[in-house]
Amino acid sequence: MALKSASISENLALIELLEQVSLDRSVPLRAQVYEFMRRAIITGKLSSGAHINEVEIAAKLGISRTPIREAVKKLSDEGLVKVLVQNGTFVSEINREQVEEAYVIRIALELASVERAAIKIDSKQIEDLEDILMAHEVALNRKRFDQAIAYDDKFHKYLSEINSFPNLWKAVDISKAQMDRCRIGALPSPGAGQQTIDDHKAVLEALKQGDASAAKTAMTVHLDRSFDNTMSYLNDLENQQSLD
């Protein structure tokens, strides 16, 4: 799918987003710009084809272009933006192959993570996961879908923290960027969010029992369902685009 030109509404969306950004000068600017832009793309606030004007962003934030360029380079490496020589930088289309690759990476790493967690988890960590699940459900019931997705990720990230494997989650998080772009579009569909919570409860129950095999099975069911929902959403999106 070819990148479209940025519309006036998309440019205004970027300006409005920039007005909400408050930079902390004690934290590396490139990291803050990267996180802000990545989140805006993944949540669909910056849609496919939206123009990323580095000069405008730098001026609006009152910083040099250097941290902007560094953030754009990192986003380009993840396939979230496309830098076209002499044309500018644009938000990339969702890439089907990258979505499929993310699933392969994610299921390999997360099955290993949950298997180890079932052996290592303690009562305090079980309570922490229960708290994350409750907060996730509240966010979903209030239709705060950005928050619901954040709690979904927090549940998975916490499993890697039980194992003291922070880099495992980083690898998963970076690889699944394209998949995440589909999640925000698919989540408002009836039952999608509640199914995720039910899947997490099944994983947690296996963890409580210290049953590594059951935990792996529950996680497999969950990730397979997530992948199927993602591909279904992507198919619908591509069909719609072919009609436009």
Image (spheres, rainbow, N blue to C red):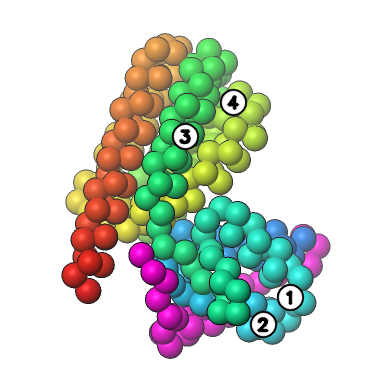
Three-letter code for the amino acid on which mark 3 is drawn: Arg
Q: Under tag 2, what secondary structure?
A: helix
Q: In percent of the image, x 65 and y 35: which residue is there?
A: 167
Q: What crowding class fits label 3: few (fewer than 14 Cα within 10 Å), some (14-19), or many (20 or more)? A: many
| Element on which disc 4 rests | helix
Which residue, as the protein is rendered here, is positioned at the far front? 85
Task: Using the numbered discs, state the Cα–Cα distance from disc 1 to disc 2 in whole angstroms.
Answer: 7 Å
As drawn, is 102 to the left or to the right of 242? Answer: right
Helix, strand or loop for disc 3: helix
- Give the distance between the C-alpha atoms of the residues marked 2 and 3, in whole angstroms: 36 Å
Circle 2 residue: 55
- Residue that label 1 marks: 65
First in sequence: mark 2 or mark 3? 2
Which residue is at 77% across, 60% downward?
27
**Three-letter residue code for mark 2:** Val
The circle on residue 158 is none
Which numbered disc, 1 or 2, marks the residue that appears first in the sequence?
A: 2
The amino acid pointed to by label 1 is Arg
Toward the viewer: 145 or 142?
145
Q: CA distance from mark 2 to mark 4?
A: 42 Å
Residue 74, percent from left and from top: 64, 57
Q: Are marks 1 and 2 in contact (CB under 8 Å)?
A: yes
Residue range (magenta): 1-27
